[in-house]
Image (cartoon, grey):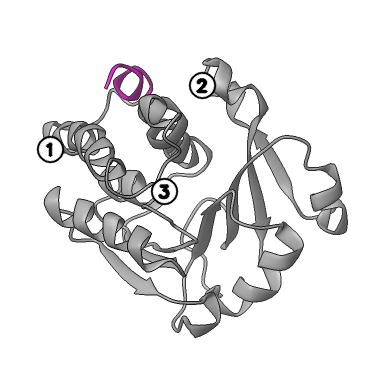
Amino acid sequence: MEYILKYFPELNERQREQMAQLEELYPEWNAKINVISRKDIENLEINHILHSLGLVKFVKFTPGTRVMDLGTGGGFPAIPLAVYYPEVTFHLVDRIGKKLKVAQDIAERIGLTNVTFQHGDVKEVKGKFDFVVSRAVMDLGDMVPLVKRLIAREDHNAVPNGLICLKGGDLSGEVAKYRNQVLIDELSSYFKEDFFKTKKILYLPL
């Protein structure tokens, strides 16, 4: 919890309890199902929970915002975000059922009531969302055609509705097609740990 509280001291007691539970439950599950790399589970707080919360630094979601997490895996970034934003709804989608079950179990055990789950392909998703978020799932050029139809037209937040991705490394080739629309925000401007030196938020209004 050291790093979470360092950057998010505004968390209330309930949220702090839930974040602490994440640090217990993910290693417990990871011993059974490899949701996070075995070598990386010891870096859970910084590399996964704090990384997910990077989106909070980019945009503050207003109550009632609807967010879909594409390729959520074990629940990143949606589960930490759902703890931070109890008045925002999150729909977690993944094609790998066993990973989604981990996210669902953890959400239930920490008492989240603002999350829903869908096992399957994004093409099967119905409804509208203000934002689609993802964490190192697929190339932007492949993702945009899949999610564009899911973005609601009415804006409720400081930034227009669209796609927000957590990415790393050199993104120049990936964003070339959208270079006049895409915004890249460096996570190193918010978090000082070495892990974030190459980590970015990629935002594309849709």
Q: Residues within 10 Å of mark 1 (few under 14, many from 20)?
A: few
- Indicate the secondary structure of the residue bearing disc 2: loop
Residue 129 in the image: state x and y as whole percent.
46, 71
Q: Is 101 situated left or right of 169 in this image?
A: left
- Indicate the secondary structure of the residue bearing disc 3: loop
Tell me where residue 12 sits by quadrant. Answer: top left
Residue 41 in the image: state x and y as whole percent.
38, 31
Circle on res. 40: none
Q: Amino acid at mark 1?
A: Arg
Q: Residues within 10 Å of mark 2 (few under 14, many from 20)?
A: many
Real-space CA distance between mark 3 and mark 2, rounded to the nearest whole angstrom: 18 Å
- Residue at mark 3: 76
Q: Is 50 situated left or right of 162 in this image?
A: left
Tell me where residue 26 sits by quadrant. Answer: top left
- Residue at mark 2: 191
Part of the protein shown in magenta: 1-7
Where, quadrant-wise, is the C terminus in this rendering?
bottom right
Q: Is 58 situated left or right of 174 in this image?
A: left
Q: Is residue 163 above or below residue 58?
A: below
Circle on res. 14: 1
Q: Is residue 158 above or below residue 184?
A: below
Residue at figure coordinates x 24%, y 31% from the top left: 11
Mark 3 vs mark 2: give the one in front: 3
Q: Is residue 151 above or below residue 168?
A: below
